[in-house]
Every structure is written in structure tokens, then in C-alpha cells.
């Protein structure tokens, strides 16, 4: 499909790897030292997935750029895979964090900020009652637990090739014969995946109806548009069907806005007027300070309250000692009020369109059968001629070797893309020159491939 000469690709990749090694002696030195004390030389296993053989070590980061320990500057289009969607160290959040660090970090007591943040999230996402976690993963875990508790049902439904954090129930996929099975790479599954989960292809209303029909589904957990296997947008009418069918079959609808917050200040939910029972969030909401949140309707909150005893509240599997801490909430309050504002999105979204226009133009100029999909402040190219309609199609359009070359070519010319697929994200600090730098470099990479 990609019509790429594989031998040529291998040669080009080797040349880029050599260049990378030559340009990063200090990162290499730190990596060699780190290997003795951390598996893979990294503090978290994903950090080994960068192209080039070893990661770039960061010296400092600010706004849409970072500098590495070899003194090189980068346009950051990865932005910590959305954790730094605010831009690195946004000044308003930094000022608040500085103040709060000196005024108590965590006390397992609420601060005034908590109710202010909850009110603002309610205004943005349309569900009124909020709880806080330290990550989007935990927000999803807790939402699933509550859904099971209030419905008394064992299973959840997820989309094929979804990602919702390290949540056991979600590492399921469809086998070629349509069974729910453990996803490739799933480590240490506690039970067979079909005991907890039913998988449906994105945009497949009939499959969704069949999955809900047995009446044993507590919740459908979904991103409103898939973002973790490339971007897959919903067909017109898919969300209406999802809402109607979950209601008809007594399952809760949990919308995970962790990445789709890029669609606007109230995420995809607000832009498309969705009405979930529960919304989950994380990553960027506190400007990079660990924080997650989940919001629910009054009906869900009432159902929970009717089934939870105060005496047992600390051992029910919801919560965490540091969750809802003063520092996270202060950072979230300022980030929402002063960084991820309506005005910021009004700048970020046209920049993502500019990025996608540049990618589309280079693809057309080099007559490649590739496609670029847009989702608010985020855009992504994949190696298929049309936009995928489900996760399996998006996955089939991936090409790890080609991605590694394109990412390394960009990295060697001062641009960081997410290591998982070909996604670019705009922050409030990103400027047109950053985007245009990528357009130039992407065009050069395609010219090399097609020579
Ligand atoms: C849609 C979605 N939900 C949840 C998560 C989990 O986020 P975290 O790893 O910060 O808990 C991710 C992470 O990539 C995500 O993409």
C-alpha cells in the first residue's frame, strides 16, 4: 500500500541512526550509565520506544520547545503524549504551583480549589459532580468499578484497538473470528479477557447492539473519536446510536476525554453535544502536574450514594492517598482558568489545520497513497489513502519501520513526534514557524523516500 522501496528505507534509516548517534554524545553517555540501574535505561518502559536506539535526554523544556543535554533545540509536537498539551511549564500554572508547594502539598483534606475546579469541569463537560484521581487510568478504573457496583453487571464494552490507560479490562481485541481476546502485548492479564469485556469495532452499530443485548454490560467505555491507533472519527449518527443503545440496555456511557480534550475546552463532548453518564479526564488538565478526574450525572451519583457505606469507603477500591491533593487541584484550577482557555483553543485548532495542510500537500506532491486526519488541536497521518472507519483498519495502515524512519528524520532536524504513531499536537505556545518547520522537514523526508 505504501509503495516504499524497503531496501532504500533500511539504508536511509541506518544513515539517520548514525547521524543521531553522532549528534547526541551526552544523551548516549547518560543512557549507558542509566542502563545499569534501570531496565532499558529508562524510568518508565515506554520511554525506550523512541527511534534512534536511545532516548534524547531533556535538559529543559518551555512552551512548545525543549532543549536536550547536547544543547539541541526541538519543536515538541509530542508534548508528553498530551501531558504537556498546555505547553511545557505554562507560566500561570508554574506560579500557582510555586505558591502551593509552600502552602501544603497534600493533607487528605479538601481545599477551596476542589469545588471551583469541579464547577468549571461541570460547566465545560455538562456532568455536574466530580471526583479526582492522579491519572486518567485511575479515573477510568474508578468509573468502571462504580458502573459495575451500581448496575450489578460484570462486563464492559470497549472499541477494538482502544487505549484507556493501564486498565485490565481494556486490553482486549477482536480475533479474526470476532471473539474477544487478550490484545497482543498484554502483560499478566488476571483473567481471560472475555470474562470482563466485550469488544466491538468502532462505528459498528449492529455489533454494539449485539454486545449489549445479553443485558450483562455495566458500561461502554469509549473515546468519542479513537486517538490511540491513529485518529478514527465517528460516522455521522454513531454517537446518537451509542447513547440510545446504552440507555435501552441499561448500560452507562463513559466517555474518556483524556486525548479528545484537543477538540475544545469541553472536549469532543461539548463540541458535539454528547450526553455521557460519566466523563473521564487526565494528562493535561493540571498543566503536567499529575491529576485526573471523573465527572458524573446526578443520577449516577445518587445510585452510588445509595450503595456505599461511609464505614467502608476507604477499602472499596476507589480513591488513593494522594488523589485530590492540594497541589494537583491548585494546578488544575489555574490551568483551566488561564491556560486551556477558549482563546487558547481558538489559536491551537487553526495551527493543527495548518500542520495537516502541510502534510496533505507533501503527500499529494509525492503522490503517496496516505491520509491525514484532523481532530481539533491534533492531527495525524497514516499510510492508507482514506480515513479509517475502525481501529482494525487504522492498525492495518500502520507501518512501524516507516514510522521509525520518519520520526528519526524529524528528530534529527529538531522535531519531536509521538513515538506511538504519527500524531502532532498543538499547544497554546506553538507558533506557525514551528508548524512550518515540520512541513519543510516532512517534505524532505518524502523526497528522500521517493528518490
Ligand atoms: C484516551 C486515554 N485515556 C486514558 C489514558 C491513560 O492516561 P495515563 O497513562 O496518564 O493514566 C490514555 C493514555 O494515553 C489515553 O490515551
Image (tube, rainbow, N blue to C red):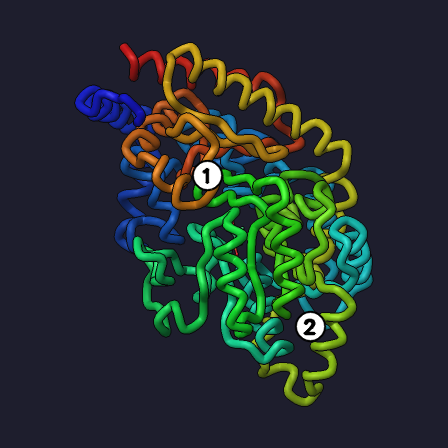
Q: Is residue 420 left or right of residue 311?
A: left
- Residue 123 seen in render: yes
Helix, strand, or loop for circle 1?
loop
For residue 288, say whether it is visible.
Answer: no
The residue at the point 72 percent across, 39 percent down is 339
Instruction: Residue 304: name its quadrant.
Output: bottom right
Looking at the rendered structure, which numbered label has been put on residue 317? none
- Residue 156 is situated, as x and y percent measured from the top left of the image, at 51, 67
Residue drawn where x is 46% and y is 44% of the image = 390
Q: Find the distance from the CA under tag 1 to the CA under tag 2.
A: 39 Å
193 or 216, which lies in front?
Answer: 216
Left or right: residue 147 compared with residue 97: left
The vertical placement of 3 against 307, above or below, is above
Q: Residue at x 71, y 64 (%)?
A: 296
Question: Within 10 angstroms of label 1, few (less than 14), some, or many (20 or more) residues?
Answer: many
Residue extending furthest left?
Answer: 7
Q: Nearer the viewer, residue 203 or 409?
A: 203
Position of 306 relative to 221 (above/below): below
Q: Which residue is mark 2?
A: 108
The C terminus sits in image quarter = top left
Q: Residues within 10 Å of mark 2 (few under 14, many from 20)?
A: few
The residue lying at 38 percent from left, 13 percent from top is: 367
> Of label 1 and label 2, which has the lower sequence position?
2
Front tag of 1 and 2: 1
The x and y percentages for residue 20 are 30, 27
Residue 374: give x, y in percent of width and height: 56, 31
Total labels: the figure holds 2
- The percent position of residue 44, horizontal first and vertical second, equals 40, 53
User: Where is mark 1, residue-wise?
Assistant: 230
Q: Secondary structure at mark 2?
A: loop
Tell me if 116 is positioned left or right of 238 in this view.
Answer: right
Amino acid at each position: 500500500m505504501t509503495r516504499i522501496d524497503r531496501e532504500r528505507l533500511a539504508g536511509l534509516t541506518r544513515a539517520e541512526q548514525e547521524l543521531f548517534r553522532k549528534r547526541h554524545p551526552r544523551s548516549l553517555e547518560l543512557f549507558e550509565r542509566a542502563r545499569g540501574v534501570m531496565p532499558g535505561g529508562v524510568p518508565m518502559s515506554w520511554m525506550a520506544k523512541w527511534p534512534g536506539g536511545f532516548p534524547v535526554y531533556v535538559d529543559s523544556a518551555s512552551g512548545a520547545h525543549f532543549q536536550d543535554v547536547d544543547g539541541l533545540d526541538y519543536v515538541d509536537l509530542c508534548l508528553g503524549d498530551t501531558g504537556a498539551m498546555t505547553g511545557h511549564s505554562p507560566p500561570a500554572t508554574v506560579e500557582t504551583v510555586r505558591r502551593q508547594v509552600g502552602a501544603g502539598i497534600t493533607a487528605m483534606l479538601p481545599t477551596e480549589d476542589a469545588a471551583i475546579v469541579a464547577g468549571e469541569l461541570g460547566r465545560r463537560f455538562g456532568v455536574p459532580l466530580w471526583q479526582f484521581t492522579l491519572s486518567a487510568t485511575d479515573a477510568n478504573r474508578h468509573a468502571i468499578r462504580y458502573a459495575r457496583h451500581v448496575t450489578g453487571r460484570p462486563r464492559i464494552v470497549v472499541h477494538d484497538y482502544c487505549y484507556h490507560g493501564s486498565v485490565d479490562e481494556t486490553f482486549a481485541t477482536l480475533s479474526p473470528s470476532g471473539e474477544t481476546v487478550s490484545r497482543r502485548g498484554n502483560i499478566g492479564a488476571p483473567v481471560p479477557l472475555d470474562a470482563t469485556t466485550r469488544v466491538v469495532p468502532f462505528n459498528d452499530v449492529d455489533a454494539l447492539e449485539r454486545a449489549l443485548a445479553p443485558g450483562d454490560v455495566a458500561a461502554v467505555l469509549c473515546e468519542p473519536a479513537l486517538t490511540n491507533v491513529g485518529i478514527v472519527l465517528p460516522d455521522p449518527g454513531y454517537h446518537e446510536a451509542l447513547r440510545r443503545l446504552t440507555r435501552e440496555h441499561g448500560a452507562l456511557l463513559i466517555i474518556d476525554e483524556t486525548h479528545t480534550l484537543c477538540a475544545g475546552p469541553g472536549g469532543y463532548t461539548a463540541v458535539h453535544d454528547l450526553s455521557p453518564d460519566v466523563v473521564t479526564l487526565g494528562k493535561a488538565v493540571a498543566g503536567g502536574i499529575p491529576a485526573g478526574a471523573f465527572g458524573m450525572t446526578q443520577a449516577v451519583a445518587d445510585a452510588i450514594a445509595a450503595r456505599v457505606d461511609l464505614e467502608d469507603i476507604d477499602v472499596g477500591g476507589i480513591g488513593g492517598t494522594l488523589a485530590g491533593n492540594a497541589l494537583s487541584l491548585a494546578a488544575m484550577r489555574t490551568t483551566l482558568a488561564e491556560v486551556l482557555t477558549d482563546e487558547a483553543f481558538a489559536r491551537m485548532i487553526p495551527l493543527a489545520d495548518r500542520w495537516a495542510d502541510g502534510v496533505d500537500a507533501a503527500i499529494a506532491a509525492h503522490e503517496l497513497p496516505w491520509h491525514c486526519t484532523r481532530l481539533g488541536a491534533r492531527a495525524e497521518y497514516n499510510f492508507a489513502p482514506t480515513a479509517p472507519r475502525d481501529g482494525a483498519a487504522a492498525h492495518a495502515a500502520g507501518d512501524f519501520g516507516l514510522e521509525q524512519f520518519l520520526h528519526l528524520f524529524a528528530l534529527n532536524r529538531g522535531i519531536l513526534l509521538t513515538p506511538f504513531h504519527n500524531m502532532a499536537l498543538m499547544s497554546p505556545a506553538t507558533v506557525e514557524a514551528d508548524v512550518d518547520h515540520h512541513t519543510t522537514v516532512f517534505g524532505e523526508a518524502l523526497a528522500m523516500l521517493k528518490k
